[in-house]
Amino acid sequence: MSDPSKASTSEIERELRRGPGPASAAANGTGAGRRGLADSEEATAASRRLTGRIAAEGLADVSYAAVDSPFGQLTLAATKRGLVRVAFPEESIEEVLERLALRISPRIVETPAPLDEMRRELDEYFDGRRKDFELPLDWTLVGPFGRRVLSVASEIPYGGVLSYAEVAADAGSPRGSRAAGNALGANPIPIVVPCHRVLRTGGALGGYGGGLDRKRFLLELEGAL
Amino acid sequence: MSAALPPFQRFLEAQREVVWRFLISSVGPTEAEDCFQETFIAALRAFPRLRAGSNLRAWVLTIAHNKALDAHRSRGRRALPVGEPAAVDGRSAPAAEEPDETLWEAVAELPERQRSAVVLRYVNDLPHREIAAAIGCSEDAARRSLHEGLTKLRKVVEI
């Protein structure tokens, strides 16, 4: 290292690797290098401002957010057309998002603002203050048969129930109660599209994508049980 | 390994720090925020057209590099916030300041491609191949830009 210019270059390289000085007070006092945790914190804050702007300007194709409910944290996802997905807490958020990316668009951003109205209606429903959802729905994730079955289910009034056989018949497939059950089980917008109001003939609960305890909870909330 | 594009949110979470570090070092804290927003808004618009399996980091750094160029150009039309331009001849290097500030001001004064190459190499710790992809040149040209940038910085800092 007798060549002074070489030594200088390596000093410059070291200096460059440490990065420029802190950009904000958040960076001071972290003690972990010159910029400390500033990059990570500032980048996180900047990306939150970014997703707020994306929501405000309507640049995302899908917005999603977590919302609290008696079932734990639900994930709501909406397009510009309306609510497209309600996911239960135990569902894999990554799988939910990947499926939305594949079926709708990868322009998916986590941002609560576009879902505020939907969150409010859900809160009112769980408080027993709302019997009908007014929020618009996006049926993109549902095939034609599922759409017919779920349309029938969504006509069942609060407090009422139908059997799988009745739903199948109303959906135009009188012998398709098993297929109707599958379509109800695959409901991408549970709670809001009330597939929980469909029971076995004779009144047994049957199945539920979110688990039978939740189905019972919803039916008791609605006074149907 | 999935062939599909990730949801934009996951892409943003994975790349925001590398982009922020690049911009803080390249355009400074005042303009980093705007450049960051412009970079990811542009990325969001183009995102669905992106080929699955693309190098997402190099792709978003290309956009950030271009936004940094825009910022430097519009700053050039205004006044420079960091004193006299390009101390390549050494006469106008700020004296008796914190060594790092002198250096970082000199980084800000580097020609565009050299500045990006230097920042991507040392601040972002990117290999030459990715630097080349980000600034849109060959790997050899990236190495040259890096070398030329370092040479200029050495002249400024040694004074």
Image: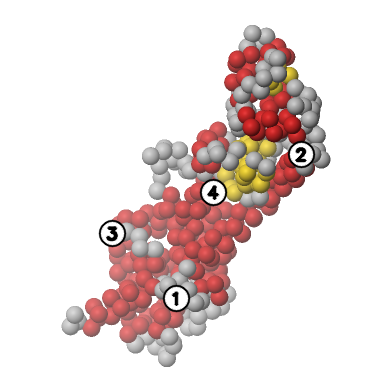
Asked if one can make out residue B50 in the rendered structure from this viewpoint, the answer is: yes
What quarter of the picture does the N terminus of chain A occupy? bottom left
Q: Position of residue B102 (x, y in %)?
A: 42, 82
Query: Quick one: A105 or A201, which is closer to the camera?
Result: A201
Dot 4 alpha-carbon crowd within 10 angstroms: few under 14, some 14 to 19, many 20 or more: many
Residue matched to label 1: A31
**Residue drawn 65% across the image and 33% down it:** A214
Report whether B115 appears left or right of B144.
Answer: right
Residue matched to label 2: A125
Q: Position of residue A129 (x, y in %)?
A: 82, 40
Eyeballing the image, is A61 above or below A37? above
Q: Disc 2 on helix, strand or loop?
A: helix
Numbered mark located on residue B9 in the image: 4
Asked if one can make out residue A121 in the rendered structure from this viewpoint, the answer is: no
Query: Quick one: A125 or A221, which is closer to the camera?
Result: A221
Q: Mark 2 and mark 3, same subunit?
A: no
Residue matched to label 3: B140
Report whether A62 appears left or right of A119.
Answer: left
